[in-house]
């Protein structure tokens, strides 16, 4: 029983750190897309502003330790960018 508890705890900790490491990678993908003029030219000003807002909110959530929220926000930004 104790082994199962420790295994479950270890799995939860590993999963949380995996999400935490995913956020910077997603931010990097968004930043790279925003530097690509071909990608940016396909967006209107409202979409571009929304992407920047989602990116900033995602970074803020990541910094606060809310990695699920961060990933969700960053994935929304990627969807708008088409990446």
Image (cartoon, rainbow, N blue to C red):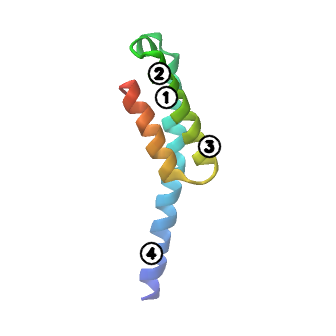
Which residue has dot 2 on it? Answer: 46
At a point 51% along the width and 59% down the height, the residue shown is 16
**Secondary structure beneath disc 4?**
helix
At a point 59% along the width and 35% down the height, the residue shown is 56
Q: Which mark is residue 60?
A: 3
Marks 2 and 1, how far apart at CA: 6 Å
Question: Mark 4 or mark 2: which is in front?
Answer: 2
**Secondary structure beneath disc 3?**
helix
Marks 4 and 2, how far apart at CA: 47 Å
Q: Residues within 10 Å of mark 2 (few under 14, many from 20)?
A: few
Please tell me whether residue 76 is drawn above or below residue 32 in the rendered image: below
Marks 1 and 4, how far apart at CA: 41 Å
Q: Would residue 38 appear left or right of 24 to someone viewing this image?
A: left
Contact (Cβ within 8 Å) of mark 4 with mark 2: no
Quadrant hosting residue 53: top right
Contact (Cβ within 8 Å) of mark 2 with mark 1: yes
Please tell me whether residue 49 is drawn above or below residue 58 in the rendered image: above
Which residue has dot 4 on it? Answer: 7
Quarter of the picture holding the C terminus = top left
Which residue has dot 1 on it? Answer: 50
At a point 45% along the width and 67% down the height, the residue shown is 11
Image coordinates for residue 70, horizontal then vertical, percent:
51, 46
Q: Residues within 10 Å of mark 4 (few under 14, many from 20)?
A: few
Name which of mark 1 and mark 3 comes first in the sequence: 1
Q: Residues within 10 Å of mark 1 (few under 14, many from 20)?
A: some
Image coordinates for residue 18, horizontal then vertical, percent:
49, 53
Name which of mark 2 and mark 3 comes first in the sequence: 2
**Secondary structure beneath disc 2?**
helix
Question: Mark 4 or mark 3: which is in front?
Answer: 3
């Amino acid at each position: 029983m104790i082994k199962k508890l420790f295994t479950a705890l270890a799995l939860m900790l590993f999963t949380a750190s995996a999400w935490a490491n995913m956020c910077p990678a997603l931010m990097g993908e968004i930043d790279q897309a925003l530097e690509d003029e071909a990608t940016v030219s396909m967006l209107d000003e409202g979409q571009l502003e929304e992407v920047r807002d989602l990116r900033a909110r995602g970074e803020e959530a990541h910094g606060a330790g809310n990695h699920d929220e961060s990933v969700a926000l960053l994935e929304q930004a990627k969807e708008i960018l088409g990446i």
